[in-house]
Amino acid sequence: MYKVFGRLQSRASRVLWLLEELEQEYEFIDVGPHDPQVTKLNGTGKIPVLVDGDHVISDSSAIMTYLADKHGAFTYPAGTPERAQQDSLFHALVDEFDALLWTATRHMGILPEDKRVPAIYESLKWEFENSVSRLSKRFEGPFLQGDKPTIADILCAHCMTWARGIEFPVNADNLRAHGKEMRSRPAAQRMGALAKRT
């Protein structure tokens, strides 16, 4: 059984969502960054961390890719043009959505007060809007790449929810509809039920 260390209000939720989609059993250990249980596994203290037997994997992006490849679902096969397109979308989301949202969140309250730059918020918000516009044009529907959902769809939906939480606008009807549809999936609902129990 997999073990996932992290918090539901973090990138760990992406991993849990994927595990639910893959219908894999897992144990969720609800701990924050730098918890002794985490630092024992990952020297950086960052969450999430996945334990698969003797193997420890950190970083939500790496974990999602590993799980999708291992179980042959929510991904296209490595070495195919479709996988290259999936990777392109996934890395664009990490670079142009996740990174901007994380920087904004840190400056809104995580960094020490004397290190925060409130003015950066509007700049990041503007940059995010441009990123949303670019992704909207790449959207094929009903999922990012057409008929098959991939880990990029989970990542996108998670970022859309995060954006809403920090009041970053998602001015693209197709991406808003996509996020709503993804969040209505049974796996996403099961993950939401887990949040209510912890």
Image (tube, helix red, strand yellow):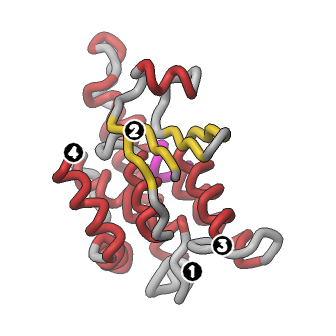
Spatial CA span between label 2 and label 3? 24 Å
Q: Which residues are magenta?
A: 95-99
Residue that protrudes farthest toward the right in the picture: 79
Disc 1 crowd rating (10 Å Cα; few below 14, some 14-19, many 20+) is some
Q: Is residue 66 left or right of residue 137?
A: right
Query: Most extreme residue toward the left, as rendered?
Result: 196
Front residue of this view, candidates 160 and 58: 58
Q: Nearer the viewer, residue 136 or 70?
A: 70
Earlier sequence position, callout 4 versus callout 2:
2
For residue 43, side relative to residue 185 (left or right): right
Q: Which residue is mark 4?
A: 198
Q: Which residue is mark 3?
A: 72
Which residue position holds label 2?
Answer: 6
Q: Which mark is residue 145?
A: 1
Distance from label 3 to label 1 (Cα)? 17 Å
Residue sitting at x 57%, y 72%: 74
Q: Secondary structure at mark 4?
A: loop
